[in-house]
Image (cartoon, rainbow, N blue to C red):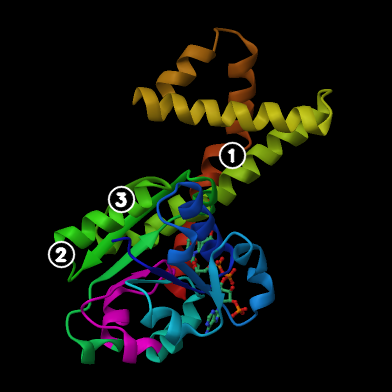
């Protein structure tokens, strides 16, 4: 029988997850409940048949899987609220940045060994193109398989040690924003060299998508693919070298490090 899923915290990511699960046909809309305090903003989900409520306790009680998608500073209060209805028969999945499975488990200690997962997806989950990193504790193989299948339905998934979850947040979740900024810069450059914004956007986005698909489908390294484009004395290497003279790779690496340090500090 299909599991019922409660998404506690229907914001940017919570809504994207709900949309991705629907798009993939992973479950029926009626098996998904999304909560938030300001219900008005969940109306579009309701129109798709997803249940919406501001009652976290009822949503969790009626569900087999409780997916926590509130902000980091909100999670402890929310988990405390859900303790009466969470037990070892339920699966808890947290997508909350920087909050460990132990911190969540400590709030549930009175309920025995509750299966807790951490999942770090990104907003491309809405179109089933997420990269999701998963860690887990106290979970049966059946529960692990189900959670992996859930996130496989909405993109690609990899199981990692929890100590890498902050790094996964940066590379895989913040990474969507980094990629968008790179694409935006290409659009700005494209406009400068003659394209209208719409055509530049199409070319920039499809070119980045194609580059990523080359790596994912062929298993090659970026430099192998770059060597196929950089004709000797050609325009590609002239542009690439100028970008490196301006600090392209270094700025990306420093940015990733800055995001990581920010998580560690919070
Ligand atoms: N956005 C992203 O790309 C990613 C985000 N994350 C993590 O996911 C979590 C959510 O991020 P994001 O979606 O961007 O943040 P948002 O602020 O967009 O979403 C958080 C949601 O939680 C709701 N909320 C807050 N308190 C409660 C409560 N007590 N009961 C029910 N709902 C509540 C808020 O709605 P209201 O105020 O109406 O209650 C809001 O919709 C964060 O921990 C973030 O670190 C992880 C990976 C990627
Ligand atoms: O920026 C943030 O803190 C969250 C985590 C990853 C994406 N958004």
Residue 139, quarter of the rendered image: bottom left
| Lower position in the chain sequence, tag 1 or tag 3 | 3
In this rendering, does residue 256 appear at all? no
Q: How many callouts does the rendering have? A: 3
Q: Residue at x 38, y 25 (%)?
A: 217
Please tell me whether mark 2 sits on a helix, a strand or a loop: loop
Residue on which the image places disc 2: 140
Residue situated in front as seen by the camera: 45 or 266: 45
Give the distance between the C-alpha atoms of the residues marked 2 and 3, in whole angstroms: 14 Å
Residue tagged by mark 1?
247
In terms of secondary structure, where does tag 3 sit? helix
- Could you tell whether 55 is left or right of 219 in the image? right
Residue 141 forms part of the magenta stretch: no
Across and down, in percent, residue 18 comes to 50, 60
Q: Residues within 10 Å of mark 2 (few under 14, many from 20)?
A: few
| Above-or-below relation of 72 to 232 | below
Q: Earlier in the sequence, mark 2 or mark 3?
A: 2
Circles 2, 3 touching at the beta carbon (< 8 Å): no
Residue 117 at x, y = what percent? Answer: 29, 67
Label 1 crowding class (10 Å Cα cut-off): few <14, some 14-19, many 20+?
few
Q: Is residue 103 magenta?
A: yes
Pair 1/2: label in front: 2
- How far apart, in angstroms, are the residues tagged by discs 1 and 2? 47 Å
Residue occupied by mark 3: 149
Report the magenta residues as a range: 82-106
């Amino acid at each position: 029988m299909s599991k019922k899923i409660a998404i506690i915290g229907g914001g940017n990511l919570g809504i994207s997850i709900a949309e991705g699960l629907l798009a993939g046909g992973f479950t029926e809309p009626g098996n998904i409940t999304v909560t938030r305090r300001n219900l008005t903003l969940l109306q579009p989900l309701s129109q798709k048949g997803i249940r919406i409520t501001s009652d976290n306790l009822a949503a969790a009680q009626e569900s087999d899987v409780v997916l926590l998608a509130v902000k980091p500073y909100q999670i402890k209060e929310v988990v405390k609220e859900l303790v009466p209805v969470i037990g070892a028969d339920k699966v808890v999945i947290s997508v909350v940045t920087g909050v460990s499975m132990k911190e969540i488990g400590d709030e549930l200690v009175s309920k025995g060994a509750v299966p807790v997962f951490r999942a770090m997806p990104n907003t491309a989950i809405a179109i089933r193109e997420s990269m999701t990193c998963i860690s887990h504790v106290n979970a049966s193989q059946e529960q692990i398989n189900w959670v992996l299948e859930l996130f496989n339905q909405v993109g690609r998934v990899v199981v990692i040690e929890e100590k890498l979850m902050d790094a996964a947040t940066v590379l895989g979740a913040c990474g969507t924003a980094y990629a968008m900024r790179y694409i935006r810069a290409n659009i700005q450059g494209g406009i400068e060299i003659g394209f209208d914004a719409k055509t530049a956007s199409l070319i920039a986005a499809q070119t980045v998508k194609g580059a990523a698909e080359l790596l994912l489908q062929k298993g090659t390294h970026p430099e192998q693919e770059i060597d196929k484009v950089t004709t000797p004395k050609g325009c590609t290497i002239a542009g690439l070298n100028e970008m490196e003279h301006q600090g392209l790779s270094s700025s990306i690496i420093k940015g990733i490090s800055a995001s990581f340090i920010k998580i560690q500090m919070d």
